[in-house]
Amino acid sequence: MFANLKISATRYMRDHMSLFVFITVLFIIGVVFGAIVVGALATEQVDSLNTAMKLFFTAISLDTAGVSPSEITWHSIAGFLKTTVLMWILGLSIIGLPIIVVLIFVRGFMVGFTVGVVVSQFKTDGILFVMAAILPQNLIYVPALLICGVAGISFSLKLVQSRFSQNNQPSYVHQQRAGSGTMLYRNFLSYTGLVAAVTVAMVLAAFVEGYLSPVLMKAMVPTL
């Protein structure tokens, strides 16, 4: 079973390598833009962010944040589910393709901005804090997000191809249309199954964010 899954995953990666490269580069560009924006913030905005972070770190060190690991986990699960469901729906339409691209860029921007703010304020210690607080769940979440984006764009492109093939077929070619519809239905099932698997991975990332990251953050706060 695991051998078959590995073969299927390898084949999928090979068949969609260009999309994976595109989505990964897009996400990285978003991260870079997010970090650049931090450097362009006004002094008042930087001071406001610095104050907010100090209050946050103080609450963590005193264990007065008032949020339990289970609450963090369920909040993260809700957010991740919204993301996967939205991208799944967008992948079911042709017009959803550019929106998926924008969402991937925005997610990268958010990561870059968050990392940029912490590192700009705390330098080397900020890098260590990012590795402890942000990296663990994102090692699962980001690849899952990119896979979801590739799956959505891929299925959206298949819809475009199906639409053009139907428009170019003579009106009397019914068997070809039926075959095309069957193939599209199979692709839909594969697409939905992949998004479901990605959702499971994101749930795992939520548990990491809820139970592991707070412990690591609390351990790193005294160094900031």
Image (cartoon, rainbow, N blue to C red):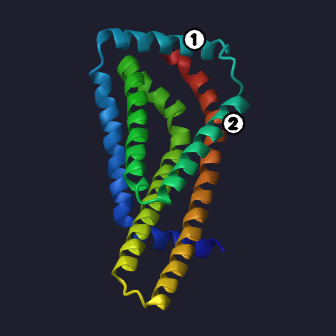
The image shows residue 5 at horizontal and vertical percentages of 59, 71
Residue 194 at least partly seen: yes
Q: Which comes sooner in the sequence, label 2 or label 1?
A: 1
Residue type at numbered disc 2: Trp
Of 6 and 34, which appears nearest the observer? 34
The numbered mark at residue 58 is 1
Residue at the spot of label 2: 74
Query: Can you say whether 203 is above or below 34 in the image?
Result: below
Residue occupying image coordinates x 28% and y 29%: 36
Residue 211 at least partly seen: no
Distance in Å between CA atoms under marks 2 and 1: 24 Å
Quarter holding residue 165? bottom left
Residue occupying image coordinates x 46% and y 9%: 51
Q: Residues within 10 Å of mark 1 (few under 14, many from 20)?
A: some
- Secondary structure under tag 2 reads helix
Quarter holding residue 72? top right
